[in-house]
Image (tube, grey):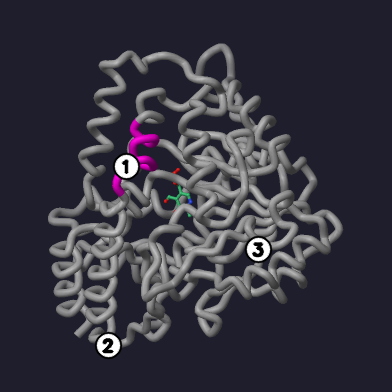
Amino acid sequence: GGIIDLRISQRAKGVPRSGIREMFDMAPKYKNVISLGIGEPGFPTPEHIVEAGAKALYEGHTKYTPNAGISDLRKAIAERASLDGLSVDQQNVIVTTGAGEAILLALLSTVDPGDEVLLPDPAWPNYFGQVALSGAQLKFVKTYDHDHFHLKAEAIKKAVGERTRAIIINSPSNPTGAVLSEEELEDISRIILSHNLVVISDETYSNILFDGRKHTSIASLPDMTDHTIVVNSFSKTYAMTGWRVGYAIGPSDVISQMAKLQESVSSCVNAAAQQACLAALKGPQDCVEEMVKGYRERRDLLLSGLAELPGIDCLMPEGSFYAFPNITKFGLSSKEFALMLLEKAQVVVVPGTAFGEGGEGYLRVSFCGSIESIKEALSRLQNLLR
Ligand code: PLP
């Protein structure tokens, strides 16, 4: 030990490790590993977007930008939001380092230590750390297989207490693939309004919808604009995970607080990446359609393969690019089952419990990678489980 005993803060210790990362950290011990673990599009970033990013660098977009992002991009995001029925302008928009930072800044700007934040169970595990950093208490609202894992207004109503200040919702959902209907969101909005809550609506997968479903943003429902911070991202829609650009749309006083906090965190998002995202929004959108078609093809391939496996039941994903099969018939915990798949078949999936207790008995299987990886994983599972 040194002279100074380095003390680790309670805040850092209070942030749990992601159960998704935990599985990946084990994978390198095995050879020939196939990963259906990560939520990363297998498609490259569309060429015209890459070109815009590269051109931006040569044209000198190599300096700081305003905290909330470049004006042209904020305007383009506001215009895009009008397609979801939101009437907002650039004052209502902040560009962030991915949707992840947007959620953290939204929480830091709206909740205090001692407040309570509601979260669906199961949910994306990064929320656990984000809420922990805000100092608020987490309270889970369970969702169920028999409801296709749709978050129900009744369950929220039961969970709301004196100290409840905010709720995070996520439709389409990671990890369950559930997509909430307009009617379900209306029911939820009535509870938000009657208890004067803030809703952080993570719409990262809003473009990845199947079987003719339409996206509804809860912010577009009556009286909800003042209660909602919409979070979205370029990561999944445009296959841009590594560019690290997301955004939030909300009441201008909240957005300006978030921009002030961004000054302390990163000052602003990478300038050239912002130009690339401007090109993504302004350019042709058929690349998005093509990728969604690709995800649907992968979903159907995976689901018909899973249906042939003994003991596995899986709901049809309605959106996002995750399947959430039920493996309770095997009598193993999710973690035991995921470890067995890694050891015996070198297939990586994520145990449902990485997403909360409500994920026990399930696995999260990503279908955003290559067709070949899905086929190979299915044939290994066939051999193992038969
Ligand atoms: N929200 C959800 C539900 C996600 O699944 C992810 C990424 O997996 C994100 C947000 C983060 O996206 P970004 O890359 O924009 O930080």
Which residue range is magenta in the image? 276-284
When asked about the image quadrant of residue 244, the answer is top left
Which mark is in front, 1 or 3?
A: 1
When asked about the image quadrant of residue 337, the answer is bottom left
Which mark is in front, 1 or 2?
A: 1
- The quadrant the C terminus occupies is bottom left
Instruction: Indicate whether 339 appears above or below 361.
Output: above
> Viewer-proximal residue, 163 or 259?
259
- The residue singled out by tag 2 in the image is 310
Q: Position of residue 193 (x, y in %)?
A: 79, 61
Q: Position of residue 57 (x, y in %)?
A: 29, 19
Q: CA distance from mark 1 to mark 2?
A: 46 Å
Q: CA distance from mark 1 to mark 3?
A: 40 Å
For marks 1 and 2, the one nearer the N-term is 1
- The residue singled out by tag 1 in the image is 283
Residue 73 lies left or right of residue 159; in this view the side is: left
